[in-house]
Image (cartoon, grey):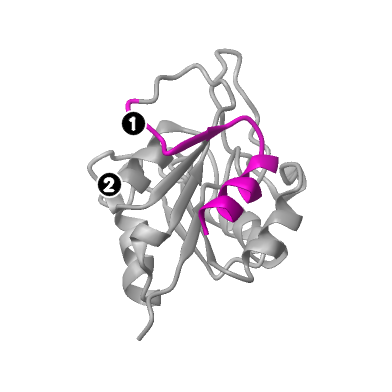
Amino acid sequence: MVKRKAIFFDRDGVLIHAPVTSNNKPISIKKLKELKFTKNIVQICKILKQRYLLFMITNQPDFERKNNTKKNIIEINQFIKKKLYLKKIFVCYSKNDSCPNRKPNPGMILKAKKLFNISLKDSYVIGDRWRDIGAGKKAGCKTIFINRKYNEKNPYKPDFTIKSNEKILKILNEKN
């Protein structure tokens, strides 16, 4: 059986706009009515779904921290899945960094690999935070870091660094 290529997108700050706190850290939206897709992401996903399986991998510790409900998170995620042609969504609700599914741990990516026969070396993780890049590196994927200039260090070296979604297609078209 032929292994398939995939793209693993982070949710907040990559697929949808993430509000930023006063100390320049991104946070998750709480309700569907707050959802706004990032620039060109609908068109980008429409093009990429021709060659890749598209997934969303997202940490949503606000549930465990009692800052949001699972119902709200699921409603937001299902809307995103439908609009962006995603094959499946993987969510980690834990706030515990030792959880194997909480990025930067690669658990969600490894689950997708097993379920969908994915070649991780031919796949990409696209994220805007160090946790996304860490998960991609640990899983053996190529990584694209969208630098939103958050107030945090990135201990992982991404394969590509871009400033906006527009460069995603350029990178993927050159590499495949």
Residue receiving disc 2 = 138
Residue drawn at the location 54% of the way across and 21% of the way down: 150
**Outermost residue, bottom side:** 1
Residue span colored magenta: 155-176
48 or 105, nearer to the observer = 48
Q: Is 89 covered by the magenta stretch? A: no
Q: Quadrant of residue 108?
A: bottom left
C-beta proximity under 8 Å, tags 1 and 2: no
Q: Residues within 10 Å of mark 2 (few under 14, many from 20)?
A: some
Instruction: Point out residue 163 in the picture as x, y percentages from the top left corner.
Output: 62, 30
Q: Quadrant of the N terminus?
A: bottom left
Q: Earlier in the sequence, mark 1 or mark 2?
A: 2
Q: Is residue 128 above or below residue 142?
A: above
Instruction: Point out residue 134 in the picture as x, y percentages from the top left corner.
Output: 34, 39
**Three-letter amino acid code of the residue under disc 1:** Tyr
12 lies left or right of 123: right
Residue drawn at the location 25% of the way across and 51% of the way down: 100
Q: Residues within 10 Å of mark 1 (few under 14, many from 20)?
A: some
Dot 1 falls on a residue whose secondary structure is loop
Give residue 94's mark.
none
Residue drawn at the location 33% of the way across and 66% of the way down: 111
Q: Is residue 86 above or below residue 34?
A: below
Dot 2 falls on a residue whose secondary structure is helix
Residue drawn at the location 68% of the way across and 67% of the way down: 82
**Three-letter amino acid code of the residue under disc 2:** Lys
Q: Is 160 covered by the magenta stretch? A: yes
Residue receiving disc 1 = 156
Instruction: Point out residue 87 in the picture as x, y percentages from the top left corner.
Output: 55, 70
7 lies left or right of 115: right
Q: Is residue 22 above or below residue 14?
A: above
